[in-house]
Amino acid sequence: MDERVLLTINHMSKSFDGEEVIKDISLSVKRGEVVSIIGPSGSGKSTLLRCATMLEKMDKGELIYLGEQAAWEENGKCVYASKAKMREIHSHYGLVFQNFNLFPHYSVMKNIIDAPMTVEKISKAEAVERATKLLEQLGLSDKADAYPYQLSGGQQQRVSIARALALQPKILFFDEPTSALDPELTGEVLKVIKELAKEHMTMIIVTHEMQFARELSDRIIFMEQGVIQAEGTPEEIFNSSNERVREFIGKFQA
Amino acid sequence: MSITVMLMQLGKGMIVTAEIFFLTLLFSLPLGLIIAFGRMAKNSVIRTLCKLYISIMRGTPLMLQLIVVYFAPFYVFGLKIPNYRFPAIIIAFALNYAAYFAEIYRSGIESMPVGQYEAAEVLGYSKGQTFFKIILPQVIKRILPPVTNETITLVKDTSLAFVLAHAEMFTLAKQIAAKETSIMPLMVAGVFYYIFNLVVASAMERIEKALNYYR
């Protein structure tokens, strides 16, 4: 297999109450690639992300991280890897949520160092060193001792990016990272993501920010009604002849 | 009987009252958490049993429960347990209060946004780590006001131990009042309960303030 492929999704399907939200989706992501997933609300893009990060169990399909099977099909049912294996696979990726989901009872510093100390069992000194670097990189050095409620939405989202990066994931997922922010704060978060792209961080981003997706992505996936309607470079997607893609993108450019 | 002697006696009763109070909290707070877990368990047998338990404990008088816990071993099982009076009181109080605390825990746990669990899961925390590091500390902050309520009720409820004629403050106050044909001892006991609760309320307020460092 191709060594550069970090994530492979094969034939993923997912239903909620009999309604199929993801219909047989296959997709793979290579090291250093930035993939944006766009599409109307209810198209299944967030569910795809939640299934890929295993917050949601898929009904059918195969999920492979760095060549290791996280889930596969057995007798028509989806089976997940053992707990020990899952823990290892979990360490390969991070997820940034729409609503940040920071831990409100922890300071910014503690939010960032707790998972590496608890999960990776690294020393506090090492965790603090990592966190300090990340805070500096994300322009939050003066906020280490603040609590989440004392920060703006944009700052909170940057902390949550730092929290995910502190575990040194190979892939970072973003679930509409700027949807809970007003336009003024959106910019500061997008800037951080752009910087990560420059450092060749592998990222999969569900977003409504068309211009951002266009500038940043190596590949854009357009989803609708649970399937990938179109896939290609930003140029291909923005100049697509596909009726639905044109219509959707047109709405944002109007 | 001089006022001093009466105060001394009631003071002794107050110590017993405080014993019942602290021992009940010591046992019922953790027990309540376990019952809350049972009440939210996936297994429907465990869930139903815990629901029934809570329903019975909240639906029948504590005074009756005290009597049942004290007399049942002998009348039902023919067991004679030496020095059982005080343990019986603590068992009955702990079992009763655990039911109330279980419902308070449950309300707190269920009010936690699912995003907190999901964030912890994606970061790789185990279920136990998620609960004890992320969820429980926030639940404690949320449930402090109702817990304060229950705790204050407990201070007053300790007086129910008089049905088993244990020498806590209320039992003593009643005895002295009967002997002296005076209402004074009962009034004084009332003042003692009130002071006890002032201390409890201000202690709880301090804890609440201490947890106000975040929102």
Image (cartoon, rainbow, N blue to C red):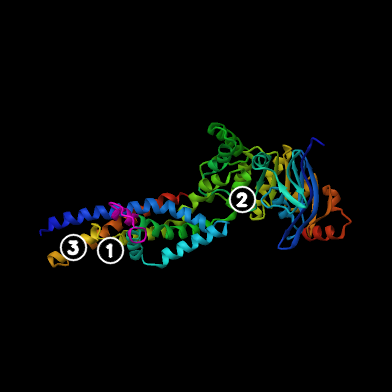
The residue furthest front is B78
Tell me the residue that label 3 is attached to: B175
Tell me the residue that label 2 is attached to: B118
Tell me the residue that label 1 is attached to: B163
Q: CA distance from mark 1 to mark 2?
A: 50 Å
* Residue drawn at (24%, 63%) of the image: B190
Determine the secondary structure under disc 2. helix
Q: Specify which label sits upstream in the sequence, 1 or 2.
A: 2
For the C terminus of chain A, which image quadrant? bottom right
* Residue drawn at (50%, 60%) of the image: B49
Q: Is A92 in front, or is A146?
A: A92
Q: CA distance from mark 3 to mark 2?
A: 59 Å
Amino acid carrying mark 1 in the image: Val
The reply to whether the magenta stretch includes residue A176 is no
**Chain of the residue displaying label 3:** B
Q: Read off the magenta span.
A: B74-90
